[in-house]
Amino acid sequence: MSIFGALDTAVSGLQAQSGAFTNISDNIANSQSVGYKGVNTNFINYLTQSTPTSNGSDAVVAQPQYTNDVQGAVSQSTDPLAMAISGNGFFAVSQAAANATGASTTTQTFQSQQYYTRAGDFTLNNKGYLVNGEGAYLDGWAVNPTTGAVNTASLAPIQVPQGNVAPIATSTASLSAELPATPTPGQPVSTQISVYDSLGTMHQLNLNWTQNATNDWTVTISSPDATPSTIGTAEIKFGNTSGNPVAAGTIGSITNATGALAGSTYASGGAATLSLSANFGSGAQPIALNLGSFGSTTGLTQYAGTSFNLLGSSQNGMPQGSFSNVTIDSQGNVAVNYSNGFSQTVAQIPLATFHAPDALQNQSAQLFTASQGSGGASVNAVGTNGSGGIDTGSVESSNVDIATEFTKLIAAQEAYSANSKVITTANQLAQTTINMLP
């Protein structure tokens, strides 16, 4: 125990409060930073000697206490690509690497270090990457555009294709309608289905229905753009008139096809399909026209009435389309939308979780890296294994409370002043002791 021990203790107090000031100032300065996680201060006492009869001078050390697992308020954003996480997950992101001298500036390269963040204010940059306000590139799983399969084995920055989408020739079409059991004499029964050829040009298929007898119809399919214009005919029978065990008013058989038409063979519950081949100037184009199922009340039926009732039709072709926009749903699916109405999922955003998120290592720009204390990242689909959900069109604010930080600031200021007073007093006592010497 000594005056000089008191000086050492007070100096450690000044250093500790200085560390607290640093944390408080960081919190206040970043109170409006998207996804920022505040840092509190823990004061730890270190003893040099303590017995029942003697207590030596101590020291105090300030250590940061991270609040990475404390959620900030979620607020709406005018940015449709912004996302806020409700739960424990983090976005996996990458940082751009500096291009080597002479390297192409059109190809973006990235650092090998994996980063994580809660700052979800993402927008689309001029190269098609999703980048947040701090310049971090959002990582995701690639989606196979043909099969829709998600490649969960690899995380990579999401780059959205912004080119045009090629036209798709119609290969399947479907018709849902009710034919009248007693059509009005002299009134034609017909409908049209729009289809596209390989160049994206739209053509009209005309389906004209003629009743041969009760429950017995002939359909003639034609198109003014096809060569020849009349594609073919087929006979369709309903109910027991077909000779097959189907319910009244449902398709029982498709027979006597002519031209470039072919009907599917009856099978209980099987698909009732008319296959046709039309030449719109680019060669034969096969199209499967789905009329429902044999014996089913969906698709094409014939019930009491005098007028034709079209319930709906569809086909899978489309014209050329140009890039329109990007959307992200609550499951993290990133979809590219085109001017022709076509939409394609190109990536899926997963979320990373940690056993000890407060032990993540802080980096600049609201970024974190995994540490020995936090453990490695567990990357999972949104809403699984405790990763949390995604609120689209929203951002997570800083979890700093200004009122609390001002209270801490006042307390730190008073403690700092008190420690400086101890140093001043100890210095005076030491000077008094020195002045006692002859």
Image: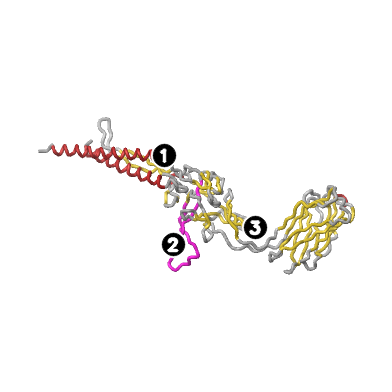
**Residue 71 location, x and y as percent?**
48, 43
Q: Residue at 30% of width from left, 43% of height from top?
A: 15
**Residue 280 located within the stretch drawn in magenta:** no
Q: Secondary structure at mark 3?
A: loop
Distance from label 3 to label 2 (Cα)? 36 Å
Per the rendered image, the range of residues in magenta is: 89-115
Question: Given contact means CB atoms under 8 Å apart, are the residues at marks 1 and 3 in contact?
Answer: no
Q: Is residue 434 left or right of residue 346?
A: left
Q: Residue at x 80, y 59 (%)?
A: 207
* Residue neighbourhood size for the residue with mark 2, other residues' Cα within 10 Å, grouped as few (<14), some (14–19), many (≥20): few
| Label 1 residue SS | helix
Precedes in sequence: disc 1 or disc 3: 3
Amino acid type of disc 3?
Phe
Question: Pointer 1: what residue?
Answer: 403
Q: Main secondary structure of the magenta part?
A: loop
Within-10-Å neighbours for mark 3: few <14, some 14–19, many 20+: some
Q: Marks 1/3: CA distance?
A: 50 Å
The residue lying at 45 percent from left, 55 percent from top is 113
Which residue is tagged 2? 98
The residue tagged 3 is 342
| Quarter of the picture holding the N terminus | top left
Name the N-terminal-most of marks 2 and 1.
2
